[in-house]
Image (cartoon, rainbow, N blue to C red):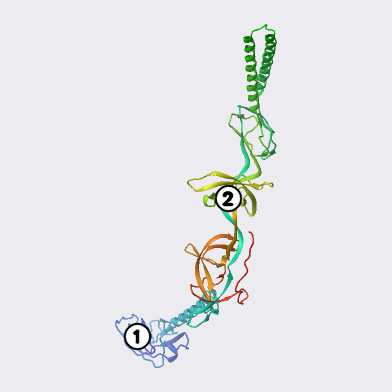
Amino acid sequence: MTFSRVMGEAGRMAVQAGYHPRSLTIPNHFASPRGPSQSRWRLPDGPALPRKRRTLLNRTYTIDQAGAEISNLAAMRPLAPRPGEDAEGSAGTFYWVVEDRMKVWSQVLVVGVIAASAAGAFIFRDSLPFIGGKQAETRPVAGGAPTLPIEAVPVRRMEITRTIEAVGTAQANEAVTITAKATGIVERLNFQDSQVVKTGVILVELEAAESSANIGALRAARDAARMSYDRAKQLIESKVVAQARLDEVSKAYEAAEARLRAEQAKFSDSVIRAPFNGKLGLRKVSLGALVRPGDVITTLDDTSVIKLEFEVPETVLGGVKIGNTVSAKATSMPDRKFDGVVTTIDSRIDPTTRAVRIRAQIPNNDDALKPGMFMTVALSVGKVPDAMMVPEESLLAQGGEQFVFVIRDGRATRTRVTVGQRLPGLAQITNGLHPDEQVAITGLQQLRDGSRVRQTNAQGTPPMSGAPNQKSSS
C-alpha cells in the first residue's frame, strides 16, 4: 500500500493506494498534538497482501475519525514486519510509521524568527523608535508630533587667523652638481659620501703634469718678454730706439702674459673645489677614472635653510605679504610642524592656472628636511576679528552642501550655510547664520525641518539663553 497525500483538515485523510478498499481505524492519540511524534498502527486482519502488488489507480479512501487532528502529519513510511510476518504482509498485517515533521519544523521556524527579531531590535535599538533608543524618549505633544531631546550651543564669535592651504616641494637653500671641467685622469679623491665641507675645499684632483710643465715654460717666456719691454722703455727715453720698437716688445709681453694665464686656467680646471658650505651627496667617480667636461662627480647642497615653493590662487594675493608666516608638514613626519616665513613672491601670475608662485624659508638646523620632500603648507593671509564659529558636529553634509539646524521657539529649522576657515573642532560660517542663534549638535539624523525639540545641555538641563562672545587667536 502507498500513501500519497495526507490532507490538512482535522479528521480527514485521503489515501491513494494500490490495493482493494478497506476501512482504516486511527487511534485518537495518533494525530494528537500532544501525542508521540511517531505512532504505530496497522491494518485490520484480512486477506494477505499479494507478493506482487497490484496498482489500482484513482482509488481514494477517506477516513473520518472523531477527535483526531491530523493537520500536521508529514509522511508515512513502512516499518520492518514483526517476527513471523512476511515483508509483503503474508500474515495479513503491515506496519507504518507516521512522522510529524511539519510540526517540528514549524516550531523551529517560529523560534528562529522570534530570536532574529529580538537580536535586530537590540542591535538597532538606538536608531529604531520605541525600542529603548533615544527616540524612545520623545514625548508626544498636541497634534501627535513627538518632541525630540537635543543639545544645542550658541554661535561663537572669535578672532581667527585666515589661512590658505597648499602643497609644495622642499628645495635646498643652495644646490649644485659638481662636474669635471677638463679631460683628465682622477688622481686624488679628497672626500667621502655625505661629507660636510667648507667653501674652497679641494674635492678632486686630475692628473695635470703636462699642464704644470707648460705653466713653467710660459712663465719663463713671460718674464723674458717683460725684461725686453723694460729695456726698450729705458732706451726710448734716451731716444736710442724708435717708438715702434717699444710697441712691438710691449705686444710681445702682453701675449706671453695671456698664454700663461690660459694655461693656469687650464691647470685650475684639473682641481675641483667646493663652491660653498654644504653637504656632499654620493660620489660618482673612482680613483683613476677618465673624466671629461660635464661628467658628474657628486652633488653639494646647503640645507641649513630649506626653500619651500608653492602656489596660491590670485584671489588671495592681496593678503600675501613678505614676512607672512607659514606652517608646513612633511608626509614622512606628519606629527611635526615646521614654521617659516615668506621671502619671495613671483612677479608674474601663471595665465593658465591663475596662480602665483610663493617661496618661503624654513630653518633646518637639525637637517630633518631633505631637498625634494613633498610638503603641505598653511599660509597665514590675515586675521578675521569677529568670525562666527560653530562646532564641527553641528554640520550636516548633503549633496555637496552644508546645513545646520537652528533652534528657534522649540523648533528646528534646517538652514544652509557656507563654511570658511576650519579649526580643530570648529568651523567658520561665512553665510547663513547670525551671531545670536543656537545650533543643534545632537540628533541631526532624526531632525527634520520644523521638528519640535526639547533643548538640553550635556547634563540634561536647559542651556543658557546666550553666551558671551569669545575672542582667541589661532
Secondary structure under tag 1 reads: strand
Residue 14's label in the rendered image is: 1
Q: Which residue is mark 2?
A: 320
Q: Considering only vertical position in the picture, is 265 above or below 23?
A: above
Q: Considering only vertical position in the picture, is 229 above or below 187?
A: above
Q: Quadrant of the N terminus?
A: bottom left
Give the CA distance from mark 2 to mark 1.
Answer: 96 Å
Q: Counting residues from the N terminus, which is met first, the one under dot 2 or under dot 1?
A: 1
Image coordinates for residue 264, horizontal then vertical, percent: 65, 23
Label 1: how many Cα within 10 Å (few below 14, some 14–19, many 20+): some
Q: Considering only vertical position in the picture, is 75 above or below 231?
A: below
| Residue drawn at 61 percent across, 61 percent down | 159
Image coordinates for residue 116, horizontal then vertical, percent: 50, 76
Relative depth, front residue between 148 and 152 = 152
Task: Select label 2 or label 1 by which is in front.
Answer: 2
Instruction: Look at the image and tell me whether residue 446 can be seen.
Output: no
Q: Amino acid at mark 2?
A: Val
| Residue drawn at 46 percent across, 88 percent down | 33
| Residue drawn at 63 percent across, 20 percent down | 258
Q: Considering only vertical position in the picture, is 233 above or below 447?
A: above
Is residue 392 found left or right of 82 in the rendered image? Answer: right
Relative depth, front residue between 298 and 420 = 420
Q: Quadrant of residue 103?
A: bottom left
Q: Quadrant of residue 32?
A: bottom left
Label 2: how many Cα within 10 Å (few below 14, some 14–19, many 20+): some
Instruction: Look at the image and tell me whether residue 28 can be seen.
Output: yes
Q: Quadrant of the C terminus?
A: bottom right
Q: Quadrant of residue 81?
A: bottom left
